[in-house]
C-alpha cells in the first residue's frame, strides 16, 4: 500500500495508536492482551499504519535537562521571502535546533533551540543565527517552566 493512500482508521487502530503513543516499547503481545487481539493481528495493523504513513517513526523522548541542555529558547524569525527556504533548511540542519516550522502570523519561522547554558545560547544567536543571510528580524523567548509537553497526537 502506498504512503499517499489514506487508511480508514477504526477504533481498534486508534486504541493501538494510543497505547504506542503512551509507551512505544509495548510489544505486540502486550498490546494484543490489552485489546483482546492476537500478536499477529496487532503486528499486521501496526505494519499497515506504518506503510500508509500514519505512523511516521518510532523514537525516544529524552529529557533535555538530564543530558545537559539546561536552556530552552523559542525564536520567532522573519526572513526575506527569497531567502525563506534556505534559512529554514540551514536552521533545520543546526544541531541546536530541536524544531523549526514555517508559520502564519507575525513571524515567518518558529524555532525551538536547546543549549547547555546562556553562553552557548549567545554564541548560537551571534555566530549561527545572525550570520544567516536573509533574516530581517529575530525575537527570542526563554522557557522558564514547562507545564505540559506532549510527544504524540491525542486521538
Image (cartoon, helix red, strand yellow):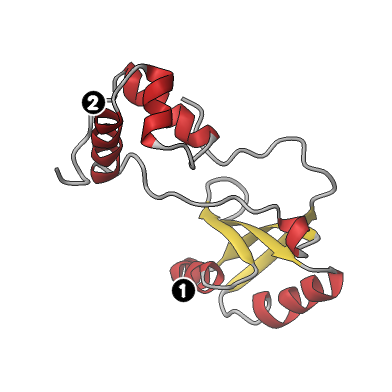
Residue at position x 49%, y 51% from top? 59
Task: Return the residue found at the far left.
Answer: 1
Give me the disc on residue 151: none
Q: Which residue is mark 2?
A: 8
Which quarter of the figure has residue 51? Answer: top left
Q: Which residue is mark 1?
A: 86
Mark 1 residue crowding within 10 angstroms, few (<14) / some (14–19) / many (20+): some
Quadrant housing the N terminus: top left
Residue 7 location (% of width, % of height): 23, 31
* Residue 139 in the image: above or below residue 6: below
* Front-most of residues 121 and 13: 13
Q: In the image, is 45 to the left or to the right of 88?
A: left
Q: Secondary structure at mark 1?
A: helix
- Counting residues from the start of the chain, the first of labels 2 and 1 encountered is 2
Q: Secondary structure at mark 2?
A: loop
Residue 73 seen in the figure:
no
Residue at position x 49%, y 42% from top? 25
Residue 119 seen in the figure:
yes
* Residue 48 in the image: above or below residue 132: above
Residue at position x 65%, y 82% from top? 131
Residue at position x 20%, y 44% from top? 4
Residue 123 location (% of width, % of height): 77, 79
Which quarter of the figure has residue 99? Answer: bottom right
Task: Say which of marks 2 and 1 sits in front.
Answer: 2
Q: How many marks?
A: 2
Mark 2 residue crowding within 10 angstroms, few (<14) / some (14–19) / many (20+): few
Residue 53 location (% of width, % of height): 29, 44
Amino acid at each position: 500500500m502506498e504512503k499517499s493512500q489514506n487508511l480508514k482508521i477504526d477504533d481498534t487502530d486508534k486504541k493501538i495508536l494510543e497505547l504506542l503513543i503512551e509507551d512505544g516499547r509495548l510489544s505486540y503481545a502486550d498490546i494484543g492482551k490489552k485489546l483482546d487481539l492476537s500478536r499477529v493481528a496487532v503486528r499486521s495493523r501496526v505494519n499497515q499504519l506504518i506503510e500508509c504513513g500514519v505512523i511516521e517513526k518510532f523514537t525516544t523522548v529524552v529529557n533535555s535537562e538530564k543530558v545537559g541542555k539546561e536552556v530552552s529558547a523559542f525564536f520567532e524569525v522573519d526572513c526575506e521571502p527569497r531567502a525563506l527556504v534556505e534559512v529554514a533548511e540551514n536552521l533545520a540542519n543546526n544541531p541546536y535546533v530541536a524544531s523549526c516550522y514555517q508559520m502564519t502570523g507575525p513571524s515567518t519561522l518558529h524555532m525551538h533551540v536547546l543549549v547547555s547554558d546562556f553562553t552557548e545560547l549567545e554564541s548560537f544567536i551571534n555566530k549561527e543565527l545572525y550570520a544567516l543571510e536573509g533574516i530581517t528580524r529575530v525575537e527570542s523567548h526563554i522557557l522558564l517552566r514547562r507545564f505540559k509537553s506532549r510527544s504524540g497526537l491525542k486521538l
